[in-house]
Image (tube, rainbow, N blue to C red):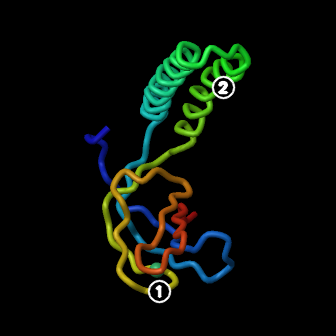
């Protein structure tokens, strides 16, 4: 995954739930192929399913309440594919870069490997949710 080329990509920088003017900037992003997206989704799903099933089974040993097991087991089974699906929807990963916050104009560092689209993270200065979308 780290071997993927980082491509300069046109990205709209906005604020979540705001109709304010958005700024378009060129930022580095890795665009994931179908195989890559499947592999990431599968890895996440396997980890979440494993941990979920482990917790569900540990719980019945610690708390022998059948009702709890009846709820936690299906939850553990559903959670894995759900996380896998959410991971599948990520079609790109941001490269580490710097932008100006759309609200407070302070310098912001976009975290490396931030999944998109949209890619969201908080401004460390004013706390607002910054939203990065692919510009078309
Ligand atoms: Zn800010």
Q: Residues within 10 Å of mark 2 (few under 14, many from 20)?
A: some
The mark found on residue 104 in the picture is: 1
How many dots with numbers? 2
Query: Cβ(mark 1) to ligand 1 < 8 Å?
Result: yes
Secondary element at image label 1: loop
Left or right: where does residue 100 sit relative to residue 90? left
Quadrant housing the N terminus = top left
- CA distance separating discs 2 and 1: 41 Å
Q: Earlier in the sequence, mark 2 or mark 1?
A: 2
Q: Quadrant of residue 18?
A: bottom right
The mark found on residue 75 in the picture is: 2
Q: Nearer the viewer, residue 35 or 44?
A: 44
Residue 110, above or below 72: below
How far across and down, in percent of the image, does residue 66 sit?
70, 13
How far across and down, in percent of the image, does residue 50 sit?
48, 20
Q: Residues within 10 Å of mark 1 (few under 14, many from 20)?
A: few
Q: Residue at 40% across / 80% down in the picture? A: 100
Q: Residue at 37% across / 74% down in the picture? A: 108
The mark found on residue 83 in the picture is: none
Q: Nearer the viewer, residue 16 or 25?
A: 16
């Amino acid at each position: 995954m780290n071997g993927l080329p980082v491509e300069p990509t046109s990205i709209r920088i906005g604020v979540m739930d705001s109709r304010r003017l958005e700024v378009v900037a060129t930022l580095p992003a890795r665009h994931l192929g179908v195989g890559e997206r499947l592999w990431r989704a599968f890895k996440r799903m396997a980890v979440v399913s494993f941990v979920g099933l482990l917790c569900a089974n540990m719980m019945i040993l610690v708390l022998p309440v059948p009702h709890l097991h009846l709820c936690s087991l299906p939850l553990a089974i559903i959670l894995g594919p759900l996380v896998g699906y959410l991971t599948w929807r990520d079609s790109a990963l941001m490269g580490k870069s710097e932008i100006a916050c759309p609200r407070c104009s302070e310098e912001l560092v976009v975290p490396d490997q931030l999944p998109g689209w949209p890619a969201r993270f908080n401004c460390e200065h004013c706390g607002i949710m910054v939203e990065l979308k692919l510009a078309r």
